Amino acid sequence: MKLKTFNEHFGITEQKTEHLNILIDNDLEAFIDPYHIANNLNNMIAKKMYIRSKSFLERLNRTYIVPNDRKNGLKFLSHLHEANEYHLGYSYNNKGKGIGPTKADLVFDSLSANKFAKAGISVTNEAHNVLLLVKGIGQDNMSDTLANVCRDILAEFTLQQCLKYNIEVFERKIEYYDHSTAKWLTKKVKLPIYNGKHIILVPQFLTSGQRIYNNRYNWFISSNFISKEILNGTIKLDVDGKFITELKNGTKKPIIKNINNHFRKPKEKLIDFVKSYNGSLIDFQDYVKLNYPSIDIDKLLELYNKAS
C-alpha cells in the first residue's frame, strides 16, 4: 500500500523540498534532532530553536529540578502535549507519543535523578546533552518537547513553505513557550489543514531517523580516549581480554570493539566519562556533525517503506 505524502496531497512536484515530506495519514519514524539544531546555529531557524529550548531547560532545571519543586515542575511540564500535528514519531497511526501527565512525571523524575541536572550544571540546559545523558528521556520525548516548545517557530516556517507552494492556509490557535516571559503563551497562526486538522512542518536538515546517541558516545570515548590510555599504559588492565593487536611491522593497534564492550557505560553513568574526559561533549558534538547526517532522500524512502 502506497502512503500519501504531504507533497503529493498538496501538489508539490519538486523531489527535494526544504521541509521534511511527511506522511499525512501516518506518522513517520523521524525526529527533531537537537544535535542538528546545535550544529547549525548559522541557520536562523536552528538558532531560534536552540535559544528557545535552552531557555526552557534553564527554567525547568533552575526553578523546579534543583529545588525539587515537583508539584510546580509537573504543572510547568503539563503544557507539553501530544504533537500530532507534526506526524513524526513511532506511532504510525498518529496517536502520538507526546508528554502527557505520565510523561511529565517521567521527564521530571529523570532530570531529578541526573547528577548534573540536580546540581544545576549547565550542560543539562542544552537539549542535545539532555538527550545524551539523562536516562528516561529518549529521542521521541525530546523531539516532542522541541515540537511543543518551538511550535510558533515551526508554524512560521510552515507558513513560509505554504506561501512558496501556494498552499491554502487557515487560522489556528497554538501554544508555545515564550522565553522572554518564561511562560507558555498562545497565538493565532495560519497553517495548512488535512482532514480537519492542522499540520506543522519541520526543516528536513533538523531531522534524523532512530539514533541511540549514548551508544555512539560510548564508541566515541572508546575510540578517542580509552584506547589511547590503554596504548600508553595510563590504564592498567587487571582483567583478561584482548584490547591491543600488533601488526606485522610491530605497530600496536587498539581493538575498539573489545574496548567498547568492556568499558562502555549505561546512559545514567555517562556523566563519569564527561567528568573524566574534559571537552568530550563538545568533541562528540563535532563528531556527530561529521558522521551522523540528517535525513536525506534515501533515508526518507527507507522510512516510507517502514511505515507501509
Image (tube, grey):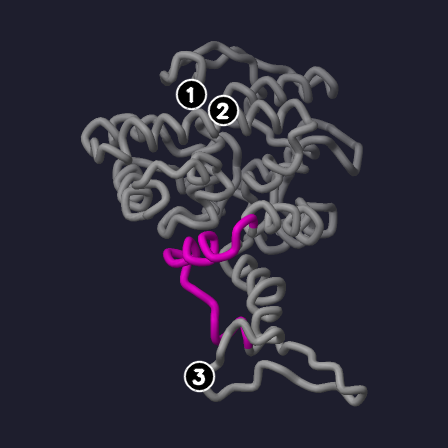
The residue shown at (51%, 42%) is 128
The magenta span reads 259-279
Relative depth, front residue between 186 and 306? 186
Find residue 62 and report its horizontal and vertical position in percent. Answer: 32, 29
- Is residue 276 covered in magenta? yes
Label 3 vs 2, first from the N-terminus: 2
Query: Is 60 placed left or right of 149 in the picture?
Result: left
Disc 3 on helix, strand or loop?
Answer: loop
Find residue 166 and report its horizontal and vertical position in percent. Answer: 72, 17
Label 1 vs 3, first from the N-terminus: 1
- Label 1 is placed on what type of residue? Tyr
As measured in the structure, the alpha-carbon distance from the residue carrying label 3 to the one carrying label 2 is 47 Å
Q: Can residue 239 be seen in this view?
A: yes
Q: Residues within 10 Å of mark 1 (few under 14, many from 20)?
A: many
Question: Badge 1 is on which residue?
Answer: 177
Find residue 123 and report its horizontal and vertical position in percent. Answer: 45, 40
Compared with 211, 3 (above or below) is: above
Magenta: main secondary structure: helix
Disc 2 on helix, strand or loop?
Answer: helix
Residue at the limit of the structure toward the left, as seen here: 71
Find residue 100 and report its horizontal and vertical position in percent. Answer: 31, 36
Query: Is 200 placed left or right of 238 in the picture?
Result: right
As measured in the structure, the alpha-carbon distance from the residue carrying label 1 to the one carrying label 3 is 52 Å
Question: Badge 2 is on which residue?
Answer: 52
Question: Badge 3 is on which residue?
Answer: 238
